[in-house]
Amino acid sequence: MQRLIFFRNFANERESEMEQFLNTSLYNLKRSAIRVFSQKAKETPGCIALTLGEPDFETPENIRAAAKLSLDSGNTHYIQNNGSAALLEAVSLFEKEKNGVNYSPDEIIITTGATEALFTALFGVLNPGDEVLVPEPAFGLYESIITMCRGKYVALDTSRNGFQISRQMLEKAVTDKTKAIILNSPNNPTGCVLNRESLENVYNAVKGRNIFVLCDDVYRQLVYDDDYESFSSFQDLKKQLLVVQSFSKPYAMTGWRMGYLLAELEVKRRLELVHQFTVVSTASFSQKACIEALKTDVTPMLEVYRKRRSFVLSRLKEIGLETVTPMGGFYAFPSIERFGIPSGEFCTRMIEQAGLAATPGFCFGSDKHIRLTYCYGDEQLEEGMNRLESFVKSL
């Protein structure tokens, strides 16, 4: 309910005469509060924003050079719908050597970022009324896409289980209408990685059933430990797997809008129709840049994130905000439960009183938390933590 009230307060648009004739699924969509709070921060003089999950690094020079060379070589025309043959081959090899999963070039679709990959996958598998299980906290985009696809969003509350998935949760949630479950590991907003027990619980719940598992692995290359495992490693369930990847986060390529979707051949042949009839194809000159990206070592950026994580976690501990240690990505998700203040109000007041913007937890289905992003420069993070401490002391 708080989500709806919050967005009504921010809505300044008058209903037009023709609005009532639009696609009815649009009426249940909400504007991204991440963008709302980022905009509010911009409009507040001197405010520091730790809202957007956008790396502060520039796209590496070798990747940009590959795009420039591609443009100078005249690669400005249509390419194959699913991506250039060279990039499809490169992704196939990368996934096999780096991630240990086998997808042939014919089982890959190069998409306009991970967002299009998610839409293509969900639009391709959902019929009206089909249920999608989403462990929460979760990225709000999932609910919006499921709503547009006329599916039903079913939340699994993991907040009392260390952000892990229990067998009991799944037994209560899985029904005859369950069509898919989304696994985002490392997770946005918590930074948590699903452990082996969680993965096996999902495996046992979907094996032998017509349920897809959508693996949103966009932070896979930004993991701080070596024991990470994706659900996509269960290749005996390959026909049920839909794997989403992105170039945005690991390679600081958010503005390039490039990602890809992996699926078993027969499934992929249907899903590629969604891709073809929505975006046709991705930009031709970006293909060589993405090939170059797959060759790029992201360790230097990861080590910077690791240092920033240590700083932010140490400051949150000093401030007295309980936080689960993020094992991947660049988000911290501290609890504000002890203050008894809804996350939207907490973040609004923090902007107005302390000049610091964070993302309220209600955006992710957890109103007792806020999300802080640490993919910003050291000075910005230091000042941001100082302002957070001052604000908390004032409550």
Image: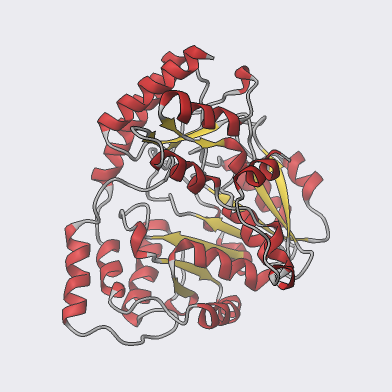
Residue plotted at (42% across, 77% down): 105
Considering only vertical position in the picture, is 52 above or below 180? above
Residue 183 locus on image (x, y percent): 59, 51
Q: Is residue 196 above or below residue 279?
A: above
Q: Nearer the viewer, residue 249 or 107?
A: 249
The quarter of the rendered structure image containing the N terminus is top right
Tell me: residue 211, above or below residue 192. Answer: below
Q: Is residue 190 visible?
A: yes
Which residue is pictured at 27% across the width and 38% down the height? Answer: 303
Q: In terms of depth relative to the viewer, which is nearer, 174 or 361?
A: 361
Relative placement, left or right, of 94 versus 59 is right
Q: Residue at x 36, y 87 (%)?
A: 78
Task: Give percent across and percent down for residue 23.
Answer: 70, 71
Between 42 and 318, which is closer to the camera in this rendering?
42
Residue 314 visible in the displayed image = no
Q: Quadrant of residue 164?
A: top right
